[in-house]
Amino acid sequence: MRNDKVIRKLETIQRGAGLNDTEFGRILGVNRVHWNNIKNGRRGYSAEFLLNAYIKYPQLKDEVNDLVANVLNASQKSNKPILACLWHRLVDYVSRRLRSR
């Protein structure tokens, strides 16, 4: 199992809803194979995937915030300001989408 708080929380949500991988993947905007590969660590997930998950399941807020903070911290330490900028834009976009609902 992948050691990722976002993915672990999504798996908990999936089990709680009694959804199989096909159904849950569809909700997240990916197919069954893609979701299965993400949750088993064989494939990473995109910002778009993260955004879809966050919009569908606002209870991911703490996990997503931790992930974004870690990415920003790592990018600042490695002097990659473009990565920090992209994550800031993603967070702004997610915030606007959630407020407009």
Image (cartoon, rainbow, N blue to C red):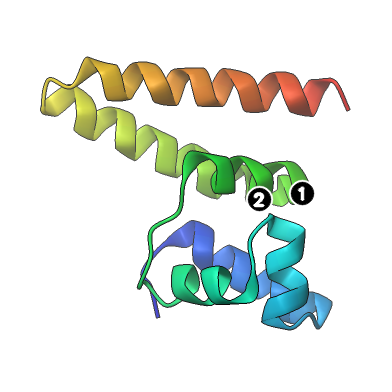
Residue 4: x %, y % from top left: 41, 63
Residue type (three-letter) at the residue carrying disc 2: Ala
Badge 2 is on which residue? 53
What separation in Å lies between label 1 and label 2 (alpha carbons)?
5 Å
Which residue is pictured at 78% across the width and 80% down the height?
A: 19
Q: Is residue 70 left or right of residue 67?
A: left
Dividing the picture into quadrants, the one containing residue 91 is top right
Which residue is pictured at 35% across the width and 73% down the height?
A: 42
Q: Is residue 60 left or right of residue 46?
A: right
Residue 23: x %, y % from top left: 78, 74
Dividing the picture into quadrants, the one containing residue 15 is bottom right
Residue 50: x %, y % from top left: 56, 46
Q: Is residue 80 left or right of residue 26?
A: left
Q: Is residue 47 above or below residue 41?
A: above
Tell me, yes or no, whether the two marked residues, 1 and 2, touch with CB atoms within 8 Å. yes
- Quarter holding the N terminus is bottom left
Query: Relative to the observer, which residue lies in front, 28 or 79?
Result: 28
Most extreme residue toward the right, as rendered? Answer: 101
Query: Relative to the observer, which residue lies in front, 38 or 71?
Result: 38
Residue type (three-letter) at the residue carrying disc 1: Lys
Numbered circle sitting on residue 56: 1
